[in-house]
Image: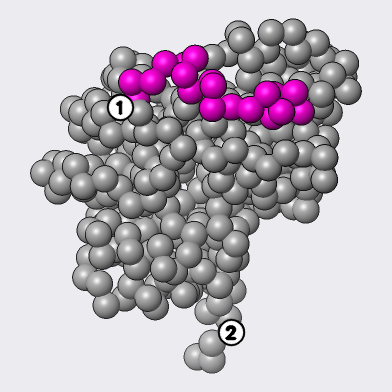
């Protein structure tokens, strides 16, 4: 295709796939799009293993890496021990989370004593991010992305040094302008329909708003995101000014995905109105599949969610146990199970290979293009 993003990333089709599964990364890239590995939670050693595997299986096709380096966090002291950080977490929050599990016949026991290592996992401070970036840039990546806030200066400088475009996710026009002026090459413009962290403005409104706001800034590309799971939505996004799309949710139910089978079943049967945008998982607003767990945190009985990354110390141990028990057939855990997903989940009705999803995007995009041509007089 003729989109600038294809030339910028060295891909055939302007479809970018964010995923935590290395197999999906490879299959999407080999099918003509670009796979981007979500590296949140990886140590430098783990990331080295993952990227080496990708290098060996991706047949030389381009791929990227996505990190979470937030500009504001409750704890920035990377030298603090798990015990010291845990002292910042009120017992009220632990007790509330435990009570949700108990109402569904789940024994919490020493849940939060057993999972101290989850504190802050995935949210990198300056030193941790630098180590991860060193690993990433030691491999032939073609894109580096930051999921929260303006990328740190050293990330932007490494991108320029290695000729690797730097991307950043934005959920508001003001954020987009700030990112572009800071030197970001690719804006991932995510509407509120998106799974995971998202803002309040819909994709249909946000994409043209941002495209207009940054059109005077040379060299900035725009990828639309938020609820996009079909080629016709991709065509609509590009008609509004985007150069391509960034997708995440649609890959959760693919054959190669490492998503829990319990979660896959929930996603495939969910409708588009069965997601909720809440701070209860990470401390920042993120969209996830609705369940009794999310309902409880939205009730008047719930304490106010803690700032990032402390809220994750409450949610991740509990939900990790919920998912494990659900996979073992525990009825209460199956009800509670939840995961990040966008409103496009209502269009995700069957599990396909990642390659087939790419091909379906292509076919649907072309069909949408032909429909648009039909509205124009010859």
Q: Pointer 2: residues within 10 angstroms few (<14), some, or many (20+)?
A: few
Tell me residue 338's x, y (percent). Answer: 71, 33
Left or right of residue 347, residue 56 in this image: left
Q: Which mark is residue 375?
A: 2
The residue sitting at 33% across, 52% down in the picture is: 150
Residue closer to the observer: 153 or 368:
153
The residue sitting at 23% across, 58% down in the picture is: 183
Start and end of the magenta stretch? 78-96
Residue closer to the observer: 286 or 355:
286
The residue sitting at 50% across, 34% down in the picture is: 309
Residue closer to the observer: 93 or 276:
93
Q: Is residue 354 magenta?
A: no
Quarter holding the N terminus is: bottom left
Question: Which tag, 1 or 2, sits closer to the chain's start?
Answer: 1
Q: Is residue 222 above or below residue 137?
A: below
Q: Is residue 88 magenta?
A: yes
Tell me residue 34's x, y (percent). Answer: 38, 43
| Mark 1 lies on residue | 128
Left or right of residue 369, residue 342 in this image: right
Q: Which mark is residue 157?
A: none
Tell me residue 336's x, y (percent). Answer: 79, 28
Residue 235 in view in this figure = no
The residue sitting at 77% across, 45% down in the picture is: 298
């Amino acid at each position: 295709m003729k989109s600038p993003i294809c030339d910028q990333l060295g891909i055939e089709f302007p479809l970018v796939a964010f995923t935590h599964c290395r197999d999906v990364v490879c299959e999407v890239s080999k099918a003509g799009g670009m796979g981007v590995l979500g590296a949140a939670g990886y140590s430098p050693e783990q990331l080295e293993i993952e990227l080496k595997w990708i290098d060996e299986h991706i047949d030389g096709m381009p791929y990227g890496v996505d990190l979470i380096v937030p500009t504001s966090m409750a704890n920035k002291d990377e030298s603090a021990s798990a015990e010291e950080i845990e002292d910042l977490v009120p017992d009220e929050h632990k007790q509330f989370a435990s009570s949700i599990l108990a109402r569904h016949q789940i024994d919490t026991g020493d849940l939060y004593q057993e999972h101290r290592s989850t504190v802050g996992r995935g949210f990198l401070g300056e030193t941790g991010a630098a180590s991860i970036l060193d690993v990433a840039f030691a491999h032939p990546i073609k894109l580096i992305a930051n999921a929260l806030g303006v990328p740190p200066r050293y990330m932007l400088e490494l991108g320029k040094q290695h000729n690797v475009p730097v991307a950043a996710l934005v959920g508001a026009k003001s954020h987009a302008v700030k990112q572009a002026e800071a030197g970001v090459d690719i804006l991932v413009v995510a509407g509120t329909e998106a799974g995971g962290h998202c803002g309040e403005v819909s994709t249909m409104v946000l994409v043209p708003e941002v495209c207009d706001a940054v059109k005077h800034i040379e060299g900035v590309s725009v990828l639309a995101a938020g609820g996009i799971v079909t080629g016709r939505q991709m065509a609509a996004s590009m008609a509004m000014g985007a150069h391509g799309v960034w997708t995440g949710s649609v890959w959760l139910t693919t054959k190669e995905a490492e998503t829990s089978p319990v979660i896959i079943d929930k996603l495939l049967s969910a409708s588009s109105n069965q997601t909720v945008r809440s701070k209860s998982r990470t401390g920042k607003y993120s969209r996830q599949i609705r369940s009794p767990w999310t309902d409880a945190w939205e009730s008047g009985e719930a304490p106010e969610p803690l700032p990032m990354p402390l809220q994750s110390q409450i949610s991740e141990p509990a939900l990790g146990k919920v998912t494990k028990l659900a996979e073992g057939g525990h009825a209460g855990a199956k009800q509670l199970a939840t995961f990040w997903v966008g409103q496009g989940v209502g269009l995700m009705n069957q599990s396909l290979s990642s390659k087939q999803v790419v091909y379906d995007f292509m076919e649907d995009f072309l069909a949408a293009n032909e429909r648009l041509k039909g509205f124009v007089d010859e």
